Amino acid sequence: MRKIILGSKLFVTLALVLALAGCGSGSGSGGNSSPSGGGTSPNAKSYPGTEDGAKALLAEFIKPGADHATLSKALRPSKGDYDSVFTSDLAAKADAVYSPAWDGGQMVIAPKAGQTEVKLGSATSDELKSWTGGAAEFPGGWKDVGAQLKPGVTFYRFKFVEAGQDLGMAYDGLAYVNGSWRIFPKPWRAMR
């Protein structure tokens, strides 16, 4: 009985320490999210620009109690991010089309209830231009955008799914650019 009580006390103490550590010493402002984009929340910068980094970042979204709005805001591209990914014409259009949605809090990436797993695929900008490699896993609109992508960028598409399922909430356009993860969803919409 004594071991159980000590174990319970240790558990409560550990839970309290973790809860306090999670509060952090930040300002509570949610990071730098100027209207021009490029929020600098640790969630956007603290994961490497690799497939494993993308998986770790996206795992944050499926954690119980995740703040999807804050996690999403950290993925907002800046004007410089758009310029690094798209040709100048599409970069300006994408910034103009998506900024109001970001400003209005409409750009929120979130799984539905019960979706506790992430499925991930990728394609480079060159693969999307030529519609080879992993490009076939992306929505067809990326085929229209391919010619306006800058070289050397790897894009990820992902789905939040229920365990053992293949269908779920699908997103595309996640990329590591200028030292941070950003999302450029359905960029063909900016071409209209």
Image: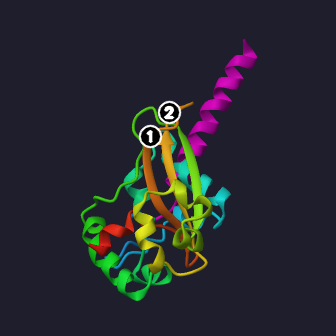
**Residue appearing at x 47%, y 78% in the figure:** 147
- The residue lying at 44 percent from left, 57 percent from top is 139
| Residue 27 in view of the camera | no
Res. 168 mark: 1
> Can residue 77 be seen by looking at this rendering?
yes
**Circle 2 sits on which residue?**
162
What residue do we see at 28% from left, 60% from top? 105
Residue 77, x across and y down, in percent: 42, 73
Label pair 1/2, CB-CB below 8 angstroms:
yes
Q: Which quarter of the rendering shows the N terminus?
A: top right
Q: Find out whether residue 13 is within the magenta segment.
A: yes
Spot occupied by residue 125 in the image (x, y as percentages of width and height): 55, 73
Q: In this view, does 123 lie to the left or right of 94?
A: right
Q: Using the image, determine if residue 4 lies above or below residue 155.
A: above
Image quadrant containing the C terminus: bottom left
* 58 sits left or right of 77 in the view: right
Viewer-side residue, 24 vs 30: 30
Please report whichever mark, 1 or 2, sits nearer to the chain's N-terminal start.
2
Prevailing SS of the magenta stretch: helix
Depth check, front residue: 39 or 173: 173
Q: What element carries label 2?
A: loop
Is disc 1 placed on a helix, strand or loop?
A: strand
Query: Within 10 angstroms of label 1, few (less than 14), some, or many (20 or more) residues?
Result: some
Q: What stretch is highlighted in magenta?
A: 1-26
**Separation of marks 1 and 2 at Cα, in angstroms:** 7 Å
> Is residue 153 covered in magenta?
no
Res 51 → quadrant: bottom right
